[in-house]
Image: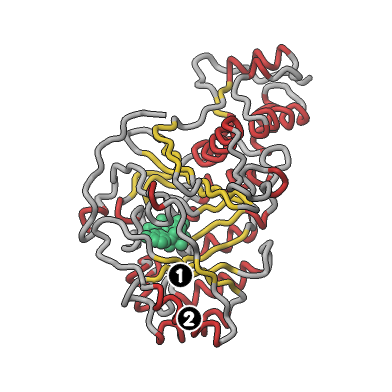
Amino acid sequence: MSTPTPTPVNTPPVNLLGLDGAALAQWVGEQGGKPFRARQLSRWIHQRGQADFAAMTDLARQFREDLQRKAVVEVPPVVKSLKSRDGTRKWLFGVGNNNAVEAVFIPEDDRGTLCISTQAGCTVACPFCSTGHQGFNRNLEVHEIIGQLWWARHALLAEGDTGRLPGGSPVVDDRVVSNIVLMGMGEPLLNYNNVVPALKLMLDDNAYGLSRRRVTLSTSGVVPMIDRLRDDCPVALAVSLHAPNDELRDHLVPLNRKYPLRELLDACLRYLEAAPRDFITFEYCMLSGVNDTDEHARELIEIARAVPSKLNLIPFNPFPQSGLRRSSPTRVKEFARRLMDAGIVPTVRKTRGDDIDAACGQLAGEIRDRTRLTSLMPGRRQAIPIIEASQ
Ligand code: SAH
Ligand code: SF4
């Protein structure tokens, strides 16, 4: 053992949940521990869900005592937990200052997908998105992002809820959470420095050990950060397209004014050089009379031909005062048929968990808008009363 670095008196404990593999090894090293101790510790925390250092029985007693003095494993408090008729689960995590963010678990017969939030609110302000209507409060820290996975995994295991639907087969690899999508509240690439260590933990064999193909980051199109992600931590990429031309996209995804479609599509092509999948997923939220005409389908075909991609048509999930309507099933069918005639086979996303407001774009959480963005948004929903802690 090397000589440990003395911890100054009154140093607040370190939340180990916020350290990726490299950072944990460095911290353990500073305490005089060897790298294998960091790996052991990581497995206790992330794989066994243990937050009590005293219970980590194969760690040396002295090391456990040091940990108890200098570190904690803490997730944000769960202020609400809901279960949908279809088995979808939603947890609301308090992140201080009366802000809360949401995580959603969607069990299917061959997988269990967890949808995670990365920011309290969002600055991009897409008019069809409930989070966008709420304004922005702050970026989530690494432990608040990974804490959603830590909590969901261990809560589901503890309840014996293995993510199976009645009659369904066991989830892949017997993992309760087999897939992760960064599609909750916030724009992950605008919280890059905290999102990347969280992604690394999801992939780390001593933490969650998921393959890059099973972790999907969804972005509204922050072009320079797409390039950085390709170099730092390429996972599967979904891009929120929603409009097939700049004029409409400037309105539906206001970030387009900064990074127009041509630049975004070029970034997608560059990303594919390092991506774990050989396609980008394009998400397209179907809004009646706004982006669902035959002409839009024609423009969309051009884009889908330019970039190896899969197209995901998402029925718009309405929320109070969005002022927008979901495209009719007949229109979605006709739109999809036009794409198919051109050799592009879209998937139409099923809506899950809408009875607990857990469907895409309905995640509202609880945000105290620091940006005053909401005062600029027409028809914004009313402020929601603060949620009482309940479990
Ligand atoms: N900020 C990122 C990730 C979070 S949004 C992004 O925009 O990609 C996750 C997905 O939900 C995005 O594709 C988003 O466009 C979609 N979405 C947002 N509001 C929606 C709504 N009301 N109905 C259906 N999908 C919505
Ligand atoms: Fe932000 Fe994504 Fe919602 Fe747009 S769709 S406001 S980028 S969370």
Task: Give me the residue at 67% from left, 43% from top.
Answer: 175
Picture coordinates of residue 24, whole percent (x, y):
66, 33
Find disc 1 in the rendering and name its residue.
284
**Quarter of the image that includes the N terminus:** top right
Looking at the image, which is closer to me, 205 or 350? 350
Q: Which mark is residue 164?
A: none
- In the depicted structure, whether residue 305 falls above or below residue 46: below
Picture coordinates of residue 334, whole percent (x, y):
44, 82
Task: Give me the residue at 67% from left, 50% from top.
Answer: 169
Whether residue 169 is visible here, answered yes or no, is yes
Tell which circle, 2 or 1, labels the residue nearer the N-terminal end: 1
Q: Quadrant of residue 257?
A: bottom left
Looking at the image, which is closer to me, 80 or 309? 80
Picture coordinates of residue 283, whole percent (x, y):
49, 67
The 10 Å Cα crowd at callout 1, few under 14, some 14 to 19, many 20 or more, is many
User: In the rendered picture of this protein, how many numbered marks are placed on residues?
Assistant: 2
Q: Amino acid at mark 2?
A: Leu
Side (left or right) of 175 relative to 151: right
- Circle 1 SS class: strand
Q: Amino acid at mark 1?
A: Tyr
Whether residue 124 is visible here, answered yes or no, is no
Please say if the residues under marks 2 and 1 sit with CB atoms less than 8 Å apart.
Answer: yes
Picture coordinates of residue 54, whole percent (x, y):
65, 15
Side (left or right) of 219 relative to 343: left
Looking at the image, which is closer to me, 300 or 84? 84
Looking at the image, which is closer to me, 260 or 112? 112
Find disc 2 in the rendering and name its residue.
300
